[in-house]
Structures are given as C-alpha cells and as structure tokens.
Image (spheres, rainbow, N blue to C red):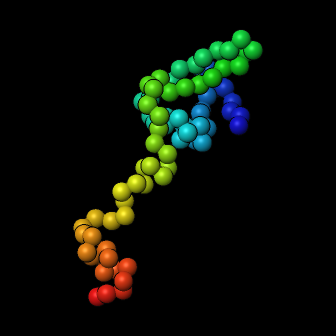
Amino acid sequence: MGTTVTSKGQVTIPKAVRELLGIVPGSEVEFHPAADGSVMLTKADDERPASRFQRLRGHAGQGLGTDEIMALTRGEP
C-alpha cells in the first residue's frame, strides 16, 4: 500500500491499516524507527482492536428468549 505525502507532511493512513489497528478519528499513533530504516506504526494505547467477528458478537437479535428461538428453529408458530 502506498500513499502520498502532502506539502504539510501529512499522509492518509489506508483504510485497511486503520481498521487493523483500530485507529479512529482522535486516535493517537506512535512511530517506531528500526535500525534498517523502516518505521512501524502502532496505535498509542495497548488495546488490541476487536476483530470484525468480535464486533458482531451478540447481535443475533433483541427481544427473543430461548423458548422463542427454539420455536423458530423447529418451525413452530
């Protein structure tokens, strides 16, 4: 992935990288230079962002109890 540096020295972090690191507007990031000349970008806090599956956990629906769900799976009215 590549990006272009603006005249102010700013770059846009690609969406895939922002999602991977959990970077949202207002997030702080850190740059870690390596001896080989590369630079690693990390989110400033140590929290690992939730995966797309973890974010969806518990969203099967609201208002249905166990008996209602079982009735739906059995095809009962």
Total numbered labels placed on residues in the image: 0
Q: Quadrant of residue 76?
A: bottom left
Residue at 71% x, 34% y is 2
Residue at 59% x, 33% y is 13
Please identify the quadrant where the N terminus is shown.
top right
Whether 23 is drawn above or below 41: the answer is: below
Residue at 49% x, 50% y is 52
Pick the residue in front: 25 or 34: 34
Residue at 36% x, 83% y is 74
Q: Say if residue 28 shows up in the picture.
A: no
Please identify the quadrant where the C terminus is shown.
bottom left
Q: Quadrant of residue 64?
A: bottom left
Q: Position of residue 25 (x, y in %)?
A: 44, 34
Q: Residue furthest top?
A: 35
Q: Say if residue 30 shows up in the picture.
A: yes
Q: Position of residue 30 (x, y in %)?
A: 53, 20
Q: Position of residue 43 (x, y in %)?
A: 50, 27
